[in-house]
């Protein structure tokens, strides 16, 4: 599962 952090310009990927 990949969640994009919309609160930042950086896209962080979280493996779930």
Image (cartoon, rainbow, N blue to C red):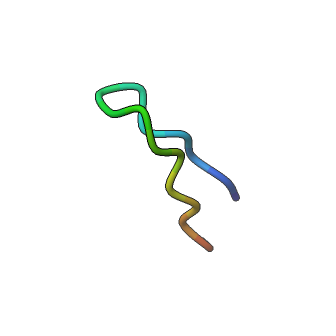
Residue 14 image offset from top left, x and y in percent: 54, 66
14 up-or-down from 8: above or below: below
Quarter of the rendering occupied by the C terminus? bottom right
- Camera-side residue of 10 and 5: 10
- Camera-side residue of 7 and 14: 7
Residue 6 image offset from top left, x and y in percent: 41, 26
In which quarter of the view is residue 5 placed? Answer: top left
Residue 11 image offset from top left, x and y in percent: 53, 46
Q: Residue furthest front?
A: 9
Q: Residue at x 42, y 32 (%)?
A: 9
6 up-or-down from 16: above or below: above
Q: Residue furthest right?
A: 1
15 to the left or right of 1:
left
Q: Residue furthest left?
A: 7
Q: Residue at x 58, y 61 (%)?
A: 13
13 to the left or right of 1:
left
Q: Residue furthest bottom?
A: 15
């Amino acid at each position: 599962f990949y969640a994009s952090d919309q609160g930042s310009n950086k896209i962080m990927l979280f493996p779930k």
